[in-house]
Each structure stands twice: as C-alpha cells, then as structure tokens.
Amino acid sequence: MTRIAVLGNGRVGGSLALALTRAGHEVTVADRSPDSAADAARTARLVINATPGAGSLERLVALREELRDKILVDVSNATVDGPDGLPADLLYPGSSIAEQLQEALPETRVVKTLNTMLYTVMTAPTALAQPPTVFLSGDDTDAKQVVRGLLTDLSWQQEWITDLGGIETARAAEAAILFVPHVIRSSGFTPFAVSITR
C-alpha cells in the first residue's frame, strides 16, 4: 500500500484515483486550490500530477517544500490548443513539461508516464484489441521501479512497459500528443494508445 496524492480531480485524476484505491492504495484527491494540493502532497509518498499541463509548472513549483524527496508522476501534456480545443502544438518545444518540472524541483524525483493514450486506457489497458505500450522517463531508477509497480496495479503487463531512459526522453513521449487531435477527428473518442510492436 502506498499513500498517494492525486492533484487534479477531472476525468484523468478521478479515474486514476478510483483505480488505485481499488488496488489497495490510500489515495487523496486534491482539487486545483493551493491549500488542497499542499495538504494532499504533504502526507503522500507519491504524487500524481493530473492537472492540465499548461498550468502544471506554476502549480507544482508552489508545492516545492511539500514535494521534496517525493516521487512525482507526471501524466500531463503541456500543449497550445487550437480553435476546437484540441492540441495544436507543444507548449515547450525542444523540451517537455516533465523536464521543466525536474529542473524546477531538483529534490523531487519526476517520472513521466501514461500520457500517450486516451485517459480511459490508463486504467483499463486490457480493454484494447491489441496490447498497448506505456512509457517511463525519469532520472531515478528506484522511482521508476515504484511507478512500474503502480502500472502493474493498473493492469499493465510488464512486457507492455518500456523504460525510455532519463527525463529528457519525456519530450519524445509528450510529442505523441500531436497525433491525438488527428486520431480523434478520424475515429472519435474511441479508446486508443501508442503501441510499439516487435
């Protein structure tokens, strides 16, 4: 059992919190208010950033002390949205929100994962017709091992988990968001994920 704080109570945060609670973890969900986020992060061992990526850096830097020595799992995508509200470009071209967070929070262990799929797949990967792939990016090996365990609790099989390497590899995973608006326009909000087949 891990004490987990989920920052963000939208569809992503809510579904992750429910699934992790069902898996036996002690989960607290914080809304966007600073006090709620600080209280949740302070008592957690692991914090999941499920806030909108465009505002994540500012929100999480404000929690520097609460996040000290914690694992921060970043599932967000920082994008500039187009007129239809779907991602049109990356907010941090040549970088990533995960790298920005790690640089701003050097005493926090940032791990990027679960951002290359429709949110429903995060907690139900076996519902897809073909095995999906989930990626890990981060500089701390032990932190990535903890996150790998959480992914297993969310029904991700070990062979579906690909460790890309250090936090700088998150920029590749985050760039996958640029596929999303085209996939949605083509197929609607049908569950999908990136899959590496060999």
Image (cartoon, helix red, strand yellow):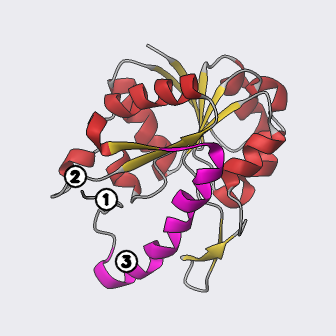
Q: Quadrant of the rendered structure where residue 194 is?
A: bottom left
Image height of 118 relative to 102, above or below: below
| Image coordinates for residue 58, horizontal then vertical, percent | 81, 49
The amino acid on which the numbered mark 2 sits, given as a three-letter code, is Pro
Helix or strand or loop: what does disc 2 sit on? loop
Furthest residue toward front: 198
The image shows a total of numbered marks equal to: 3
Q: Residues within 10 Å of mark 1 (few under 14, many from 20)?
A: some
Which SS type dominates the magenta stretch?
helix
Tell me if label 1 and label 2 are in contact, CB under 8 Å: yes
Q: Is residue 32 left or right of residue 149?
A: right
Tell me if label 1 and label 3 are in contact, CB under 8 Å: no
| Image coordinates for residue 111, horizontal then vertical, percent | 58, 38
Range drawn in magenta: 164-188
Q: Which residue is mark 1?
A: 195
Q: Is residue 122 left or right of residue 74?
A: left
**Mark found first going from the N terminus, 1 or 2:** 2
Q: Which residue is mark 2?
A: 131
Q: 84 or 173: nearer the eye? A: 173
| Image coordinates for residue 133, horizontal then vertical, percent | 33, 51
Q: Which residue is mark 3?
A: 183
**Residue, x 52% and y 58% (percent of image)?**
173
Residue 155 visible here: no
**Mark found first going from the N terminus, 2 or 3:** 2
Q: Quadrant of the rendered structure where residue 21 is?
A: top left
